[in-house]
Amino acid sequence: MKLSTVQSDAIQELGNIGAAHAATTLSQMLGSTVEMSVPAIKAIDIAELGSYMGEESAAMVAFELQGEIPHGGFVIFYISKESAIRLTNTMLGMTDMDRAMNEMDESALIEVGNIMVSAFLDATAELLGFIMLPSPPALSLDMAHAAMASLVAQMGDDVDEVLLFSTELVCEEHKIDSDIIMLPETATLKRIVELMENMMKGI
């Protein structure tokens, strides 16, 4: 699905609103200011997904979008492994950056992902009146592009291209850099675009 400039702007505004809620939530959890940004929306050819996501090891907490449109795509809390250790160290009162991640780290990351993604989706539901509920979370500790490719393979559409819009959340005090990435299926994207266009027209 090709988006016009107006449609892209509408989707980016939706990301901004959801990001503001997620950033506030993370800021409260860490007791530190969290900055946010929503870079330009990207339509990525599946064959180029690896170069976009990079080779770094990362933690990804993925949720399938459910609600008004079953199997609506995915929303993902993404954080590099280094930032993940810093985040869980902060939450668990630890300082060792060279340690291996354990079950406590995994539980903490799932909890953070759950809270932030819920805040993001709550904000979009409040704005659009369109319910997108997160499935139970699935944590992946893998190369970023491999984990993302696995999610794309699960999407129902026979797609050559995926639309990513990524919300960057940065906590300078703790050097934590994370993202919330939305990977909508075509039907979900069309519904979001329709509702955003109507809202911008004042309907």
Image (cartoon, rainbow, N blue to C red):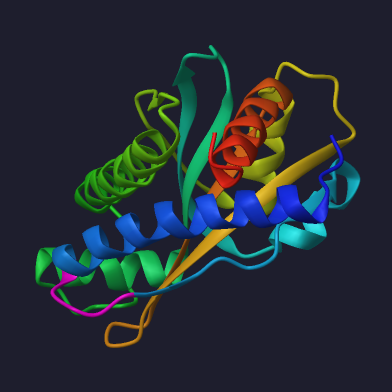
Which quadrant, please, contains the C terminus? Answer: top right
Where is residue 63 drawn, in percent x and y?
Answer: 45, 32
Residues shaded magenta: 30-34
State the residue in front, 177 or 4.
Answer: 4
Res 113 seen here: yes
Q: Is 183 in front, or is 103? A: 183
Residue 123: percent from the left, percent from the top? 35, 44
In which quarter of the view is residue 195 placed?
Answer: top right
Which residue in the rendered view is the most extreme toward the bottom? Answer: 173
User: Is 160 displayed left or right of 196 in the figure?
Assistant: right
Side of 20 where 88 appears, left or right:
left
Q: Position of residue 183 (x, y in %)?
A: 63, 39
Horizontal placement of 5 versus 94: left or right? right
Q: Residue extending furthest left? A: 93
Of the pair 40 and 6, the residue shown nearer to us: 6
| Residue 100 magenta-highlighted | no
The kind of secondary structure the magenta stretch mainly shows is loop
Q: Is residue 123 above or below residue 169?
A: above
